[in-house]
Amino acid sequence: MAQYLALTYTPDVDWWAPEHADELAEYRRFGVEFAGQVTASAVLHPTPTATVVRVEGARGGQVVTTDGPYAETKEALTGYYLIEADDLEAAVAIAAQIPAAWNGAVEVRPVIVAK
């Protein structure tokens, strides 16, 4: 069985705030329904908590960090699901059930499994 990473892009909000309770319940429902295919998942803190890391030059160069998001966008990377599926078509069918697909986007990418 292949692995696919489903990256969720949604409005950049605090999912634990009371006004998002109904939508958060949909994510929980998805997690229960697809527990057999989802092997890992996480919700990310809002982008203002991000730290961007760059190394100037090459390995061993000066490490430069910047607070906040890498880019200003309407939708942000807000979480992920690691999905096990027979093929891309099956992974897309599962990803279409993630609530982020309804008001944002879900990017599905095959995972290279190290041997």
Image (tube, rainbow, N blue to C red):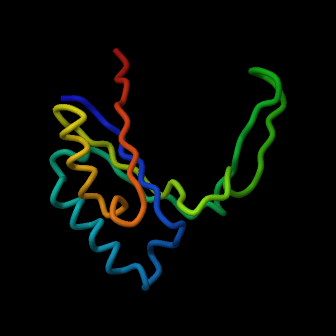
Q: Quadrant of the C terminus?
A: top left
Query: Where residue 26 sits in the image (x, y, percent)?
Result: 27, 70
Closer to us: 96 or 61: 96
- Residue 90 placement: quadrant: top left
Closer to us: 2 or 36: 2
| Residue 15 vertical placement versus 40 (above, below) | below
Question: Farthest residue in the bottom direction?
Answer: 18
Residue plotted at (27% across, 42% down): 83
| Residue 38 vertical placement versus 59 (above, below) | below
Q: Quadrant of the N terminus?
A: top left
Query: Where residue 103 sits in the image (x, y, percent)?
Result: 39, 66
Query: Where residue 17 sits in the image (x, y, percent)?
Result: 47, 80
- Residue 22 placement: quadrant: bottom left
Query: Where residue 51 sits in the image (x, y, percent)?
Result: 69, 51
Residue plotted at (70% across, 58% down): 68
- Left or right, residue 56 beside residue 71: right
Residue plotted at (34% across, 31% down): 110
Closer to us: 105 or 6: 105
Closer to us: 8 or 24: 8
Residue plotted at (84% across, 31% down): 62
Q: How many numbered marks are there?
A: 0
- Left or right, residue 90 beside residue 18: left
- Left or right, residue 40 beside residue 7: left
| Residue 96 vertical placement versus 37 (above, below) | below
